[in-house]
Structure formats: C-alpha cells, structure tokens
Amino acid sequence: MGKSIRYGMVGGHLNAFIGDVHRKAINFDPRAEFVSGCFSSNAEKNLETGEVYCLDQDRVYADYLEMAEKESSRPDGIDFVSIVTPNATHYQIAKAFLEKGIHVVCEKPLCFTIEEAEELVALSKEKDLLFAVTYTYTGYTMSKVIKEMIAQGKIGNIIAVNGEYLQEWLIDELSTEAKGKQDLSVWRKDPKLSGISNCVGDIGTHIENYVHYVTGLEIKRVAATMNTFGHPLDLNANILVEYENNINGAYWCSQVAAGKLNGLAIRIYGDEGSIEWEQHYPDYAKYTPKGQPTQIISRGQSYLGDGAATQSRLPSGHPEGLFVGFANIYRNYISALIKKKNGEKLADDDLDFPSVTDGLNGVRFVHAVIDSGKNDSAWRHVR
Amino acid sequence: MGKSIRYGMVGGHLNAFIGDVHRKAINFDPRAEFVSGCFSSNAEKNLETGEVYCLDQDRVYADYLEMAEKESSRPDGIDFVSIVTPNATHYQIAKAFLEKGIHVVCEKPLCFTIEEAEELVALSKEKDLLFAVTYTYTGYTMSKVIKEMIAQGKIGNIIAVNGEYLQEWLIDELSTEAKGKQDLSVWRKDPKLSGISNCVGDIGTHIENYVHYVTGLEIKRVAATMNTFGHPLDLNANILVEYENNINGAYWCSQVAAGKLNGLAIRIYGDEGSIEWEQHYPDYAKYTPKGQPTQIISRGQSYLGDGAATQSRLPSGHPEGLFVGFANIYRNYISALIKKKNGEKLADDDLDFPSVTDGLNGVRFVHAVIDSGKNDSAWRHVR
Amino acid sequence: MGKSIRYGMVGGHLNAFIGDVHRKAINFDPRAEFVSGCFSSNAEKNLETGEVYCLDQDRVYADYLEMAEKESSRPDGIDFVSIVTPNATHYQIAKAFLEKGIHVVCEKPLCFTIEEAEELVALSKEKDLLFAVTYTYTGYTMSKVIKEMIAQGKIGNIIAVNGEYLQEWLIDELSTEAKGKQDLSVWRKDPKLSGISNCVGDIGTHIENYVHYVTGLEIKRVAATMNTFGHPLDLNANILVEYENNINGAYWCSQVAAGKLNGLAIRIYGDEGSIEWEQHYPDYAKYTPKGQPTQIISRGQSYLGDGAATQSRLPSGHPEGLFVGFANIYRNYISALIKKKNGEKLADDDLDFPSVTDGLNGVRFVHAVIDSGKNDSAWRHVR
Amino acid sequence: MGKSIRYGMVGGHLNAFIGDVHRKAINFDPRAEFVSGCFSSNAEKNLETGEVYCLDQDRVYADYLEMAEKESSRPDGIDFVSIVTPNATHYQIAKAFLEKGIHVVCEKPLCFTIEEAEELVALSKEKDLLFAVTYTYTGYTMSKVIKEMIAQGKIGNIIAVNGEYLQEWLIDELSTEAKGKQDLSVWRKDPKLSGISNCVGDIGTHIENYVHYVTGLEIKRVAATMNTFGHPLDLNANILVEYENNINGAYWCSQVAAGKLNGLAIRIYGDEGSIEWEQHYPDYAKYTPKGQPTQIISRGQSYLGDGAATQSRLPSGHPEGLFVGFANIYRNYISALIKKKNGEKLADDDLDFPSVTDGLNGVRFVHAVIDSGKNDSAWRHVR
C-alpha cells in the first residue's frame, strides 16, 4: 500500500539548504511519497540526491521540462512538484509544470515581474491547479492563533500596524572594500539574478504577506525610502503603508542591522487591544486587551479555545520551530490536494496556505516600494 | 550659610504632578535653595504650596509678572525660574523672566510657533542667560553612555535610525462616544491649548530630541502620515526622516497603542554595530558590535571606562528611575549656573542639558511633520 | 513656619553612599527637616557635611552619645535619628538614642547577635518608640501591590516559594591571589566587622524579609549549604526553608555570580496562581492566574483597583527606582511619627515599614542558616 | 537501493504523542528505514499504524517478544528498536531486545529500580550494543555549544549550579476535590505505574542529566524536601546537591507552578564567568565573561568558532525547536551505529548521545532524592 500523494522536487540537491527543509517538512506527516526529482544541473549531484532518497533512477531527470513531460504522462506520476531553485528560474519552471497539469508548490518570490505573476495566477486558475508559495512564517501555529483572534474581534478595529524584518548578514557589504568584491552574496546584488530588489524582495515581502494573512488588510499604496549604500540593489528600506480602510502602517526591512539574526516582528493595534509577535520566539505572542495587563499567550493552551491553538504539534512550552512552520503549510496544502483528488469541493478553510495570489501580491508590493524609493518617496499604488 | 543658588517656580501647586518632580529633582543635589513661587492662579492653593515648602510669604506671588519684577530687584532674588505651567503659557512666562535677566528652565514644549521659539532663542542669547528645556530622557545616565559610545565610534558610521514612543492612555478616544465628550484629556484636543499637534508635539518630539542628543544627527526633512481618528488633533503618526548625511530613519508615535505605557524606544544602527535603548528599563542598553553577540550593558560598570558611566548615582543593578533623569538635567544646569555666577567661562561640556535651541528644533520638527501629514505625506524641510 | 518633624543622622558624611540615599529619600516628601548630625569621626568631614546641608554648627556633633544627650534635651531636638554607620556599630548607637527617647531608623542588619536584637526590640517597646530597619525592597510600590494581591487571595494558598539574591561584585575573591590580599572589601571578610556572616547577612536576609513581607509566612526552620571558597565568611549559600504551615521554599544568595548585578528575584506560587518579581525591573511583576496566560502587571494601572497601586509616585511606564523605594519607607515611617506626635493611635496599616522585629527576625535567620551550614546542613529552627 | 539502517518501534501507535516525535526525529536524516513495529496491544490500532507507514504486514507484531525473536532472525532484521511505551514497561522490553542482540533506544526513565538499571547497563555492555536513553534536551544544538564552552574553560572552574524544571499542568491536583478523582493523570499518582516518584522522576531527572552533560560534574549526595500535597507521589521538590568536587548546587522541580509551561532552566557559574540556558528559547544562551557585559549567544554564529555551533540545522534566528533536539540525538546514535556496522572503532566523540549509564544515573538520583525527602532531608549518597 502506498501513500495518498506523490511528489517531486526541482532543485534541492544534497547540499542545498532550503530543498532539504521542504523535504523534512513534507515528511512531518506521512502522506506524500517522494518519487521524482531534477535536483541539479550537475549530473553527479543530481543522481546522488536521488540515490540517498531511494528514488527510481529513471525518475531522476536531467531536465525539468522532461520531468514535467514524463511525470504528467505516467499513471503513477507526481501529484505536485516543489520548486526550490534560484529565484530567477521560478517563473519558467512553475509554468512548465502547470502547463502539464501538475500542482505546484514554489519558494518565494513567485517571480520577478507583475506580468509573469499574473500569468501564473491565470494559468493555475485555468488549469484548476493548487499553487502554494511558501511564505513560511504564516505556517507557525501562533500565526494561525493570531489570525483567529483578530477575526474574532479580540483587538477590535485595527487602527495601526507596525512590521519589521531585520537581519545583519549583509553588514559587511557596507564597508568600502566589499563593494567591488566578488563574494558569497554576489547574486543578491545582480539584478539579473535578484530582480529589481534585494532586501524588500527577499524579506520586506514577508512583512507584507504576514500582515495580510493575520489581518486581512489590503494595501492601497506605499511610500518608501530605500538605501543601497552604493550597491545596485536595496539593503534597507522604510515604508509608509496606507491600507484600503485608510489606516496606516509602517514597515522596515534591513539586511544590515547589527545584532538582528532573523528579526521578523509584527505588531497589530486595534481600538480594543493589540497583538505582537516575534519570529525568534514563534510559540508566543503578546496580547493586550484594552485597559488590561499584557498577556503572554502560548499556542496549545486551553484558554485559547477550540480553534487554531489545537493545531499545535507539541505541548505548550516545547518549541515547535521553523520546520513545523513549513510542515503546517504542506499539511494544509496536501490535505486540500487529497480532497481535490477525491473529488471533494474545497471550502475557504481548506485553502489555509499562501497561494499564487499571495505571490502576485508580493511582486506588486515589491514593485511599488522600489518605484517609490526611486522617486523621492512618492506614493505608489500597489494595485 | 546658605546654598549657592536660589530658585523659584511658576506653576507646580501641591496637586500638580510635574512641578513636584522638578522640585524633587532639584533637591537631589543640595545646591539650590527654593525661595519663591507663583504656583497657581488659585490664591489659596498658591499660599498653601508656599507654606508647605516654608517659603517667605512675601515671595509667594499672585502673578508671574510681579514675581519676575520683584525677584529681579532683590539682592537675594532667584537665580533661575522653573516653568511648569500648561504648555500654552510657556512662551509668555519664559519671555517675562528672560527680560528681567533671570535664567530659565522650562518644561517642554518650549512654545507653539517657530517665531516664538526663535524669539526666545534670540532673547536668551542677547541677555546671556542659561535656558534649559526639560527633555527629560536625555538625562538618564545611560543616555549619556550611549551618546559617548556613538561619539567614540563604537557603532561606526550611522546607517539607520528607528525611534518610537508609544502610549495607550488615549485609546478610549477611539470609541465613537468619546469623540463629543468633555473629558480629562480635552485640552489635548483643543488647538488653543495644545497648539497644532497633540501626539507629535507631546511625545514625537522626544524621539527627535533623543536621537539628536545621542547621535548628533541633524534632520533635513520629514514625510509623515498622521491619524486623528476623527479628532481635531493627531493621536498617531508615522514619520520618514532624512538626515543631513542622507541616511534615513523612521519614527512612530502613538497615544492609542494598547499595552504601551510609556514606550520610548530608540535604536541606532551603524556599519560597525548597533545600540538599542528602551525607556522602561533605562539602566540598560543593548549593544552589538558587528559580528559579535549582543551585549546587555549597564551604567556604572567598569567595562564602560571612565566616562559617562561614572556619573551613575547608584551602583549597577539598582534602578535609578525617572527622578534621577530629571535630577541629572538640573545637576548639569545648576553646575553651569554656578560657574557662570563665579565668572568662569563655560565649555561645551558644561552645557550638557537640553537647551532653548533644542526647544526650537522640537517646534520646527512638529510643524514640519504636521504639515507633511496634512499634505499627503509630502517631504517637508525642518529648517 | 517649619516642617512637622526634625531629624538627625549618624554616619553619612559627604562621600558615604547610603547616607546620601537616606537623605534624598527623606527629602522626597517635604515633611522632615534635617537639623543635626554626627557624620564622621573625622572632624573635618563631619563639619563639612553639616555646612553643605546648612545645619547649625552646634548641632553637628563629634560624638553620637553627645548628640543623643543634647538633642534629647533641647525643646526643638530631633524626633528621629537615621543610623547609617558601619554594621558593627548599629547596636550601640541605636541603643543610645532609644535610651534618650529618640525614635530610630537604622540600616540593616540591625545588629550581629540575637541577644542584642532582642534587647533593641524590648527597649523600643518599653520606651514606646518607632524603630524602622531599612530593608529597602519592601518599599517599592510593586512590593505593596504584590502583598495586597496575595492577601486578597489572587494566588490562593501558597504552596511553594523561591527567592534568590545574586551579585557578582566579589567574584575576584575566588582567585587564589585575592585570598591573602588586603582589598576594598576586606571588612566583609572580618568577623569583627561583619558578624558571623557575609553573604547571608548582607543579602540573604533581604530574601527572608521580602518573602515574609509579601506573604506573611513565618519560617520554622532552615537547612543550608554554605560556601566560603577559602575565606573566613560565606560568599554563597543555598537554603532549604520550611514555613510554619509546612510548605517549603528555597533561597539562594551569592556575591560571586558572574553577570548578576543586584539580582533579587522572588517567586511565590499558590494553588490558584503565581506572582514573580525582579528587583532589576521593580515597576512590574508577572502574575499568572491558574489556567490563564501570564500577565505583566504594572503599578499605577487602574486594573489593580484602588489599593496599593495608587501609591505610585509616577505614572505607569516611568521607572520609580530605588530612591522611591527608600522614600516610601520613610513616607510611612514619618506619617506614623506625625500621628504619634499628635497623640493619635496607630493602626496596623500605619506601621507599613520594616520594623525592629523584622530586624530581629533577620538576625535569627542568619544565625540559623550559618549554624546549619557549619553542621552538614542539619535543620535549624529559626525561633 | 535502501537506507543503511533499519529500525522498528515498540509503542507509538497513531494517537500516541511521543512515538510520533521519535519517528519524525529519525526521519530528519534519510538514513534509517522504518520497517517493523509492535505499536499497540490493540490489534486494530497496531495494524492501522503499520499501514499508514507502509510497513509489511508480517513485520507488524502483536507481541514485542515475537518481534524481538523474529526480527533478530531475519537477514534484513532491524538494527535498532525505539521503545516508546509506558514507563513501567521499559525495563522488560529493553531487556528482551538486548538479549536478542538488537541495539536499543529507550524513552526515559530507563526503568524504576537501580537493580534493573544496573542489569541493563551490564547486558548492553556484555552484548556490545548501543543503548541510548532519550534525555532530549541535551540534543539541542545550544546544549552542545554550552558543553563545549565550559570544556574550553570559558567560565573557569565551576563554583555554583542552579537548575529548575517547572511545569503547571498538574496544578488542579492541589484542589481537594481532585484528590480522590480518577483523572487523565491518574497513572502519575500510581506507584505501580510511575515507580517511586512522579515529579522528580519525570522532570527532576532532566535537570540532573542536563547539568552532568554540560559540566561533567558528578553528584556525590543530595538532600531534599519533597511535597506530595496529599497525593501518593511527589509533585514538587527542592534539592540541595553536593558534587564530587565539593561545590554545591540547588535543583527545583515542580508540576504545580502556575505559569510555567515547560520551564527547564539551567545556570552554571564559574570563577571566570557564567552560562544560562532556558528550554523555552533553546537557540540562545546568556554568557557572561567575568567583568564583562552579559552576551546573548546564538548557535550558528561564527563568533562561536568551528565547534558545536556548526552543527546547527538552520541559520541563526530560525528556531530549531524540539524535533531538532530529538533528531540530533538520533543523528549521533545512528552515525555511531553505522560506524559500528562497518566495523569501525567508536571514539568518545562518536558517543555524543545520552546512554544507558545516564539512564542508570537518573534512576540512582531519583532514589536518593526521594529517600532524602522521606527522611527529613537527610543527605543521601547517589552512588
């Protein structure tokens, strides 16, 4: 007897970081069988990866187009593909599999241009395929708790938003000697490989996606300052945000902030309370009901009721960590896929994973921010 | 034998909060004798306050003009006056004492219009008088440590700034029923009593002053979103900042942020490190030298060397608190005054207290922010 | 017109630390006039201190016995004396003033032997004098809030207690070369000057006093390990505690704990909730009602009701600090003294300051702990 | 091609919590194939679990003895078994597999009596089998960093230890009505099912194991207070510890501490610095070199050098979480097993996982603590 779902992967050879995270995440729930891949343009690496995962040799492909073609033709072909290749290749690979009728999970960013993103949205709709984009932080159990609490009115009407995503790993790029040097992060500075943005595209877009996920707020327009510090692409940006309901927020992203490892921090303020969440400690959030003390809330606690908190995979106090965040996205995606395969109709609740539309929104956000940054911080509409 | 310096107070009757803080702060160092006052327009309260502090009855004045006149005529008249009256009266009272040759300490904001502020700057210069404006947070020992560390190059060249000052005390103003109601905070909503701004003028300006104090950065221009939530004046504002050296910062102030008591938090990032300080825990700061772990530094510790840390009034680990912040401003102000009375020349180091020029900069900042906020976040120059 | 109460000080010359804290603390409320002192055995220092505080020269005494004698004979003599001399002299000085009918505030420890302590308790009772011992941490507003919450049953019946007081300032004493050396802290190692204990007597006793203050629990017996690391007196101790109601606690005090500045931390657990307080952040406490999230509570907030929280001297979010802790002890002591002078009867609530009985309990605790520590951790009764 | 190692599991049917954690942990590294099991005494549950994991039906056994027998006879039999059954059965099951020459991983506690534990140690030695006991917290990357730093002398000679493990989940047991009630946790109160101890055996032993792992310190004797609050077994205990080098520590474990989810916190003090670690935030530790500021250190950072920090599975700032802690124990265990199968000699470094000897030490510790607790806190030797 086999598992219900079969999947393949493009990218993610043995030494690649993020592909391995995806495989572990899928593995958290024993429902999807790993059967096929095109892991690397290097033939040796490609085959070696297949061997370690005990794949049939003839389902380890040298070429993703061949993989899409052949897998879509077999009776036991893959149900979905995970795309974990360099950013510049997402569009073409996703398109290839969609065209062959294969469901897609793709690392973020979805792609570089708004046109490409709109095309992928349209194509997945036309083909009736499930397309997830792995904005990973919405997968944390607490992210779902926060979304639920806001939807339940626990903080009332939202009146202000603050989001930041700060890292330090590119700080050496600020020194003069680094600017001309070929280094590890060189592709981040090359528009051909990174698109029009480095920092906003890589991490700023997580703020945008996270805030949208937990609040449902739609951004109307943005005004931004952008700092390249002499490099071709942005390393730091401050962004004023106006939402459709006319309230404001401010986002800040930076890859040159000394002391910040992976500092995504989101704070949502309402007229009846506030909620704050920090990625470094993802199992907890700070909740302040108006006029009351600030509470440290934890997923998995009975005071949170029968909703999202019960999706915890570990008792309270045991850190779930990033792998669980990823695994939760795949859990929901694969559950939806199983329902779909079984001919069941999918409700909104079944689609609790970041979608290709979220991917499109991300691309639009990045374009608006960078355009504002290049035009003296003029307001730019996101749609 | 008496103390070296004599002072009086305008405002600050027994039930007034901030006047009492000023008196306690002055009292921390036994160098200034409290001899005169005009505490309240209510005659009874006025006299009662004088009695409690054992003042001569004939030096408790019904009128601040009379006080300025008479005290300036006596051989044992006051050296300086502390002005702790409602904001709308600062300008006229300060002017009256300056004109009589009496040194001035004035609560913030200095005044409401740029013209008034410039006049007070000019007048204090013309009369050669010491004029302090009590931006209290720069008085904390750690604020001086941070200023010193930045000046010593501990974080290199500054590349980004983030400041916020969040409070929750006006959150009830967001509910519909509050909007027409006469309440305790009504004067905050009356432009006659609060000038052109409520939130930015009251707390946003502390961010501006603090960042300038510790970094020396001069603001070139600002672009802001401002939220009144249906009230005449601002309750929340997000501010993009451009400094003269072309780097950027972002400031956020709010009086409607549930869970925030008095949340002034300042973060300065450089190309060699960063420093973060939060007013709730003023004895500590987080310092991250590039490539090293974040350190929790504390005033009063020998690893900080022989500079500002030695100005601690308590051993490390014993919280100094707000009274000490105020007391340090007065310590430096009174030390300067004693030197001046003794005919000594004052060096820059002697003037380590917020000055009338800082007060002017605050007024300019508020005007630029509010103007931008009313004009679709257009950039506005601060000077 | 003068202030209601007059006081003098023994010890506390200009360069002495704790005497100055006492003076500032008394000064917080303008009710006690500083009129007399015997500040130092060094005549010059003694007189200089008197001058700075504008005392009459003939009330600056070379000898504390003379001071007690003369002040008790004058019609305008001092109402109380503050004793801030080295520990070894507390007993004799306190006794001298009590015998002359003068109320006493004395730094902790009250004295070194149980007999001395009992004598001072008896004497103050016999003479009907108010005797405070400045265990300063119970003076923090939050300490009063915590005491009130526990009394109100907010955590139910107490089932466990944990207290620690950790400092690092004597860590250099651990290195071999320090052991024979004459150094700043040498008096700490000399039983003649420090009594039978260094660490437990200096800081362990604060845990004992604080827990008793907030919970009302009486200690029955203790069992301890004690570490001298080659010195004559203790530098570190772990203490098992059994209270009269048969529940247990554990206390830990150390002066050699790297990274701990002044780490007094008290945690009280009940069958309906828990409260935790840390001296480094004295304005806050963590309160967990059973089955609910942990709350960060702050003095001065309306959700705490009309009790102790209203005694705040500053709005929430503005750190009160150690001076306020001291000032609150003096506030209550002087209020009681005024009532007593006015012939009013004192209720229990009027005596909310650490008393000579608390001082005796401290001495008993220290003796029991050290005795246990020297006898292989055998249980020792405290009374 | 198959994976190098094959494993089976006893216990761990689909609804069982900890068995699933073990499977996910093993799955983190694609080296061990899951081929056999005896998951439940309930035949349906047993088979269903096998099906979900796609096991051959004839390798899903109704009886663990049959499983040990048959798997040890097949050429492709399991290399190791994971035992995740109720505590009272660990001994007999582990013994059965050892006797058949199968390597063992067993949940803690190893067993209930010292004799049983010694027998398992002897048997695994005699049979030359690798036996791990999953004290999971030593598996966190930071635990390895801390062990390494202490071994490198970063905190000098250890002079004091403090460990606590606090939970709140049994607090309802304190109410009178709970004491007679049959409830979910009833087995915890039944000596037949829980052995001689509940709280010390379940969580106190984690403190003992963790401190030993990071410091290498051997416990000589313990003296404890134990609180049952009217139940047959302990719910709270305070433990004085004396190590072989004559320094002291104190441990506290409780399952009735309101607000504590899974509060394992370990603090190690040396004469050159200190290190503190808290399980709720396992990716970080506080390190204070003597005379320097406290540092927040993070696994995966280059300032930690080429040692343990490089074993991180995620970049700094991405929480690894409990699954990774477990996975690291299995990573090292399976690596050792592969070496052993390949005939390589195992060095000490190859055995970086909690062993059957650690399991024995845990049993000895529990017995000594409970014995002391029942005998008025008399010192009891651990070995």
Image (cartoon, coloured by chain):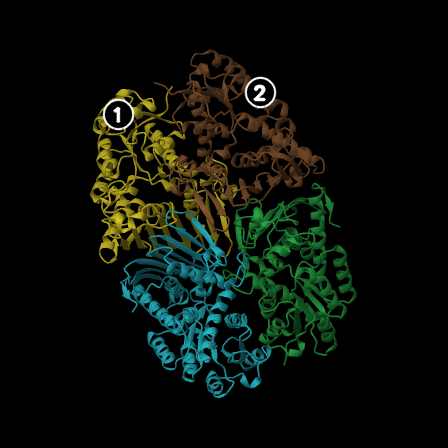
Chain colours: A yellow, B cyan, C green, D brown
The residue type indicated by label 2 comes to: Ala
Q: Position of residue C336 (x, y in %)?
A: 68, 68
Q: Quadrant of residue A346?
A: top left
Q: Position of residue B106 (x, y in %)?
A: 44, 74
Q: Are marks 1 and 2 on the same chain?
A: no
- On the question of residue A130 being in view, the answer is yes
Chain at tag 1:
A
- On the question of residue A281 being in view, the answer is no
Q: Considering the numbered disc 1 on the image, is that residue within a helix, a strand or a loop?
A: helix
Q: Is residue B37 above or below residue A257?
A: below
Q: Quadrant of residue D324?
A: top left
Q: Quadrant of residue B171?
A: bottom left
In this rendering, the count of numbered labels is 2
Q: Position of residue D22 (x, y in %)?
A: 47, 28
In the image, taking residue C375 as reference, residue A26 lies left or right, namely: left
In the image, taking residue D365 as reference, residue B103 lies left or right, namely: left
| Residue nearest the viewer, comparing B380 with D266 | D266
Chain at tag 2:
D
Q: Is residue B50 above or below residue C337?
A: below
Per the rendering, the mark at residue D122 is 2
Q: Which residue is mark 1?
A: A44
Q: Position of residue D49 (x, y in %)?
A: 46, 23
| Residue nearest the viewer, comparing C346 with A222 | C346
The residue drawn where x is 64% and y is 59% is C135
The residue type indicated by label 1 comes to: Glu
